[in-house]
Amino acid sequence: MPAQPLNRICYVEDDEDIQRIVRMSLERIGKMTVEVIGDPMVAIDAIKAFKPELVILDWMMPGMDGPTLYRKMKEVPEVRDLPVVFITAKASQKELDELRALGAAGTISKPFSPMELPVLLRAIWKALP
Amino acid sequence: MNPRSAAPSLAVPQRGADARDSADPKRVLADRVEQLYSQMPLGIAATLAIGGIATYELWDQRTRDLVLFWWGLVLLITAARAALYFGYRSSKDKLAEAAQWLRWLGISALANGVNWGFAGAVFFPSHTDEQQVFLAFLLAGIASAGIPTYAASWPMFAIYAGAIVLPFTYVLATFGNRLFAEIALLVPVFYLANVGIAYRLNQVFYSGYRLRHAYGRLTEDYTALNKRLEQQLVELDEAQRQVEASGRKLALFAERAPIAVLELDAAGRIQQINNAAENLFGWTSNELVEKDASVKILIRPEYHADFDTQWQQLIASRAPLAHLKIRNPRRDGLEVVCDWNVTPLVNTEGGVVGVIAQGQDITRQMEAEQLKKEFTSTLSHELRTPLTSIIGSLQLINSGVLGNMDPEVAELTGVAERNGQRLLDLINDILDIEKIESGKLSLVPELVTLDELVGESLVLNKGFAERFQVRYEPRGTLLPVQVKADRKRLLQVMTNLLSNAAKFSPAGEAVEVTMEDLGARVRISVHDHGPGIPENFRARIFGRFAQADSSATRQKGGTGLGLAICKRLIEMMDGRIGFTDRDGGGSVFYFELPKHAAV
């Protein structure tokens, strides 16, 4: 379990409405600092700049999907060790298995409750080695 | 008719090297007896005539009483022989009684012979020379006549003639006359010669009888064989007609079948195709059959090697293959997907003489399945994503973290959030049932401790209980029993049962949860205080979109899919689900799961 509590989060998501809800949830309820990134093509640079403790990736995004972005992150030393949580509306067992195989720290299914999102993320954070 | 039954059995009955050996000895004996008895009327008549003449010739005052006595014996014996004859003729089972009738005839022959012997012995010494010559001539004739009379039984002749000549020989030998003594020496020689002739004659007769019976039997055998052959020819003819009719029917079925039917030889060359196959693949029957085309024309070239391997296995195993889904190229370059059933035709020696391939075009079905898959995926993503925004926004507003609202606005945003949640539940249920029914829902079994899971479900659904103003209460002891189940899906079942119980229980009541140990299984029950299950709804309560009262359901919320999903999930976990009436009103919904056996 990491020594410090979860505070800084990067969220890569193209849907502006969900961006707003997640930001409100994490900032207002979770009292966390959130950086929302709308374009996955510039996400790695933004993550490097923000230096989050955990990254949330949407699965389906235009230009580059979440798993592809995650693979690219693995190639960049500054971000390769960051824990990644996927938010997905795809819920098949096969796809969840694929995410776990990629090394994802956790998955959260859409739709999620913004009231419970900070709790879920903190539970995943606590479960990290 | 079973064609096997028509298989001809033409085995000729085996006979010995000499056909006569096959004659039935009983029948031969009966024939001999019949022959002997057939001579009796003539013998009786001859005895009476010769006896009468002898009585007349030998009659004189001196020997009158003796001659009369002898004549009386002749009449008595003849009467007895006549009675024997008529007794035989009236017999109903001459075959079975042949030996008995033969013995009686032997006795009668002996009696007859003895009577003539008596005449020779008594009357020869007492009469004149002329009468002696008459008597000797008479006895010789009587004895010789026995040869044809008893030709069917030489021992009978020997008894008969012996009884005549032996007393006469004795009289000649002891008469005191040298000539008579010499004749006495010759008489036994004549007697033995006659017995020998009778024996030979008897052998000829005997052989004749045996031949007659042997050929009689052969004739019977061949008549029976002929009849059997005729019957079998009729059956074969019928079987052939049936086979031809079946063949015509099969050909018609194949020709008119809506699916493609191909007949191939053991090397995979096309021998025949039906109209449906011509239409489906674009080649005519003539083009494929006359060119001796391989069925590989219907396989994409990159799969030819795989096809060869599978074909060899098919021919070697001779086992039919079913539901092979293959993408087949058409003549116009397009492709169709077919579901193939392939059946080797095996002859009685076990060799493959051909292969029948039946293919159903499932291209549209596959496209429909793909469309359904895409639709499900779209439903999953494109509806869930906006719902995340809608429900998430409403939850944030209703939670008050963004500030207080006007009560009427809060009421309306509450309505919006609840209905958004309802819509989401419906989508999730539809996706679940679709996945279950298409066999695509896979469970993740793990060891689940049931008291913990039940406790967790009560906590998770607390909000639901509060909304309907009921309480969830465990009753009795929750058992720490372990089951092998999908934890998430088991929670889904519990959530469904608890939410149903809350919806249909009056405000202020308790919804109770119990656990029972049933030995190898464990039962979890949810007891509600609702109106119970209407009689006409019980049979379909676990069906899809099953709702007892659609207006009430709309009022309470729910999709009508929940229990159908629960039933399928529990059955996938090797359990069973059901319901009973609760004492005092309400219902009890329960499910049972097999306990995990600790290793």
Image: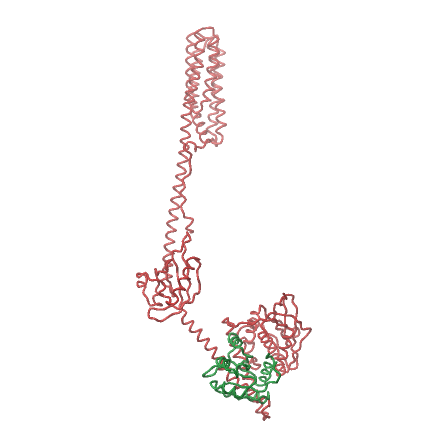
Chain colours: A green, B red
Residue B281 vertical placement versus B129 (above, below): below
Instruction: Name the quarter where the C terminus of chain B is drawn.
Output: bottom right
Total tally of numbered discs in the picture: 0
Q: Can residue B366 be seen in the rendering of this structure?
A: yes
Q: Can residue B432 be seen in the rendering of this structure?
A: no
The residue that appears at 37% across and 51% down in the rendered structure is B240
Closer to the camera in the image, B102 or B4: B4
Q: Position of residue B276 (x, y in %)?
A: 36, 66
Q: Residue furthest right?
A: B476
Closer to the camera in the image, B500 or A74: A74
Q: Position of residue B513 (x, y in %)?
A: 65, 75
Q: Residue furthest front?
A: A77
Q: Quadrant of residue B128?
A: top left
Residue B325 vertical placement versus B10 (above, below): below
Q: Position of residue A126 (x, y in %)?
A: 61, 81
Q: Position of residue B214 (x, y in %)?
A: 41, 33
Task: Describe residue B352's horizontal placement relative to residue A92 as left or right.
Answer: left
Residue B138 vertical placement versus B361 (above, below): above
Closer to the camera in the image, A4 or B333: A4
Closer to the camera in the image, B17 or A111: A111
Q: Quadrant of residue B49?
A: top left
